[in-house]
Image: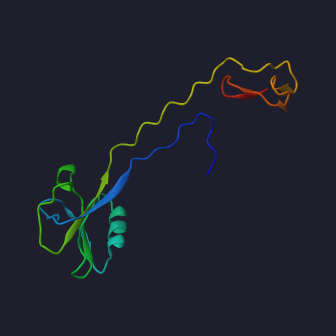
Amino acid sequence: MAPRALGAPLALAAASEWQGPFEQIYQDSDCPNLGCFGDYVLEQCKSQCEQSAGCNAFNFAAYAGKACCLRQCSDATLVSPSGADGSDVSYRFVSSGPAPTPPPAPTPSAQTLCDVSRDPWRNPATGEAGACISGGTPAFMWH
């Protein structure tokens, strides 16, 4: 992992997950059909959907040939498929919302907390030599 600049916000992503299986399936009148794939296991169907532009759901025939039909559903139809055939099930890929806003980076203090006249800096309580770090502009400084 590459080091982060001091005070740089962490990159946060929206959480997305697969939900299902659901007994209701998507019909062509619910969502456009983006293509069907035969002899696919569940994980292959999920992967195929994730790699297909606009795909956010699919019907899965687990018992009849292990096939899936990918769908591009609106937000409204994504959560309410209208079909059922008793053997196929559906899965949907949902986002829990936009990525959370990262907290603001701390504002460095212009005030130094170190006595820079001491070289090397020593802890007044213990006498240990060390370095003193204080907030400054544009970033933290070693004294």
Q: Position of residue 125 (x, y in %)?
A: 80, 24
Q: Position of residue 141 (x, y in %)?
A: 73, 28
Q: Residue at x 22, y 50 (%)?
A: 75
Q: Quadrant of residue 85?
A: bottom left
Q: Residue at x 19, y 61 (%)?
A: 32
Q: Residue at x 84, y 31 (%)?
A: 128
Q: Position of residue 50 (x, y in %)?
A: 36, 62
- Total label count? 0
Q: Residue at x 16, y 56 (%)?
A: 80
Instruction: Reply above or below: 88 against 78.
Output: below
Q: Quadrant of residue 57?
A: bottom left
In this image, 100 relative to 72: left or right?
A: right
Image quarter hosting the C terminus? top right
In this image, 6 relative to 112: left or right?
A: left
In this image, 142 relative to 62: left or right?
A: right
Q: Position of residue 63 (x, y in %)?
A: 23, 80
Colour pattern of the rendering:
rainbow
In this image, 34 relative to 138: left or right?
A: left
Identity of the residue furthest to the front in this view: 125
Instruction: Reply above or below: 101 against 2.
Output: above
Instruction: Reply above or below: 75 against 53.
Output: above
Q: Quadrant of residue 117?
A: top right
Identity of the residue furthest to the right in this view: 119
